[in-house]
Amino acid sequence: MPVLSRLVMVSNRVIDLNAATQAGGVSVAIYDTLARHPGFWFGWNGKIEEENDTAAPVTTTADGHTTVTVSLTADDYNDYYLGYSNSVLWPVFHNRLDLAQFEAGYYARYVAVNAKLADVLAPLIEPDDVIWIHDYHLLPMALELRRRGIENPIGYFLHIPVGSAQALLAIPEYRELARSLSAYDLIGLQTPGDVRNLIDFLLQSVSGRLLPTGRIRVFDAELDIGCFPVGIEPSEFASPDHSAQIESSEPSRIIGIDRLDYTKGLPQKFRAFGKLLEEYPEYRRRIVLSQFAPPTRESVEAYADIKSELESLSGSINGRYGELDWVPINYIHRTMPRNELRDIYRSSRVGWVTPLMDGMNLVAKEFVASQNPQDPGVLILSKFAGAAAQLTDAVLVNPYDINDMTQGLRTALEMPAEERLARHEKLSSVVHESDSAAWSSSYYSALVKAGERRLGRTAQSSPRMNEALDRLKTAIKKNSEKSSASGRRAAHA
Ligand code: GDG
């Protein structure tokens, strides 16, 4: 990645750098990128405080990472975070209109929090900075920064999938959201299907036009929309020795690691596991499902519902099939330390990842990267995870089809060593080639180019734009000299 201008990463939640445990794909992706690039990470620190105490940013540096954070008020948390972000945008973008709660007041606070964050961030921006905004909580952030005079390249990356245009059009404020999107230079999505859905939405919602250049004209802007599948840092999961081998003794472990979210297909997984034990009794005592499901967004009703559903399902399956010395489902509703993930993945015979819809799914990639190449476990992956577009050598299943899920599990458990090795080799090469560095480097380059195009189009009419364009061109020139000198790997598109 070019390494001259500062990269300003902005996301809803900035993780506590000193905490031992972290869960959540967005944090992992941002943390890995900032390990390779100068800059800082800006957003909410997870604290709720009185109005007067929320405005002053706090800067922290640890392990070479700098974060700048602010607090939110209780009303912000309720209406912006739990409300508009997680009870409107999250369900709708995952095609779950049935779970969306379009409450009055949510949207106004959503915009107000974005404006408040922009007030704090704008004065921290330097002329050469490149600003990269993450995820659905901060969709209006570029518009708010532009209103405060920021001309730097601003990109948006949506980590979640883009539901159908029909679903998005049900959001009462869909026009305002489309206008907010038009303030970005580049919109990055996880899969070609997401790109198609977003373009479709912009064409239908605000009469956007697809240009011969491949860009979209919306309002008075030209938008670049591209597919940049997020990756992991594989070296974090590779084992230098042969510790934590797959346990050869029975029962064999099937591992699931998912935030406790209704999009992750956990009830479907538990039911399919129960069906396997029912229809193929020879597997009883021979396998165990270890499902980690750390809590998340617990105050949202739909999350409380899924928690009780899983407790009831695991209880009934364990009660029905369990023995004094064998419990079929080991269901753990806690966050485990990140440094234990690799060994747990590596000692499992099967990685079972079954979301009903998912932007990417980093757990699938982490499982592959953790395997012993001489004796790898098998990945079972929902065809509705973004990762399925890349990890085509996994055992792909339809989580809505309980028979397909059960047969997928049998296929994985019975897979001959030769086939396990062949599939793993292909999966591993995808995970390594499309890693976190390739993701951030390709996105960053595309963002700088998109920023340059915008400034180039408007430079003639504004001296300020001219200056911004000159600075960007100098930065790009220096970046490319530096990149070719260091001979770094070419950006992956
Ligand atoms: C969003 C999108 C997209 C999970 N449990 C524990 C734990 N984790 C870590 C995993 C992984 C991350 O959290 C989860 O990432 P996912 O990608 O699977 O899912 P989301 O959190 O929903 O992430 C998703 C992602 O953004 C990135 O773009 O792939 O589609 O929904 O890294 O290992 N980590 C620890 N303890 C746990 O118990 N330490």
Image (spheres, helix red, strand yellow):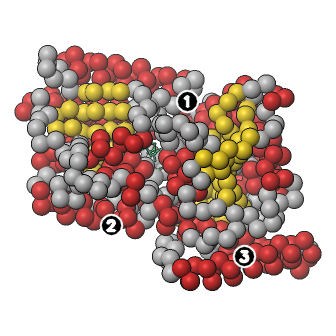
Query: Disc 1 designates what residue?
Result: 297
Is residue 165 among what the camera can see?
Answer: no
Query: Disc 3 designates what residue?
Result: 475
Q: How many numbered discs, if any?
A: 3
Please state which amino acid type lies under the numbered disc 3: Ala
Vertical arrangement, residue 428 with respect to residue 80, above or below: below
Between circles 1 and 3, the one closer to the viewer is 3
Tell me if the residue at label 3 has its CB under 8 Å from ligand 1.
no
**Dot 2: what SS?**
helix
Query: Disc 2 designates what residue?
Result: 429
For image coordinates 92% across by 74% down, the residue present is 462
To which quarter of the image does residue 39 belong? bottom right
Spatial CA distance of label 1 from label 3 is 41 Å
Judge the density around disc 1: few (<14), some (14-19), many (≥20) Cα neighbours within 10 Å.
some
Between circles 3 and 2, the one closer to the viewer is 3
Give the camera-side residue of 491 and 17: 17
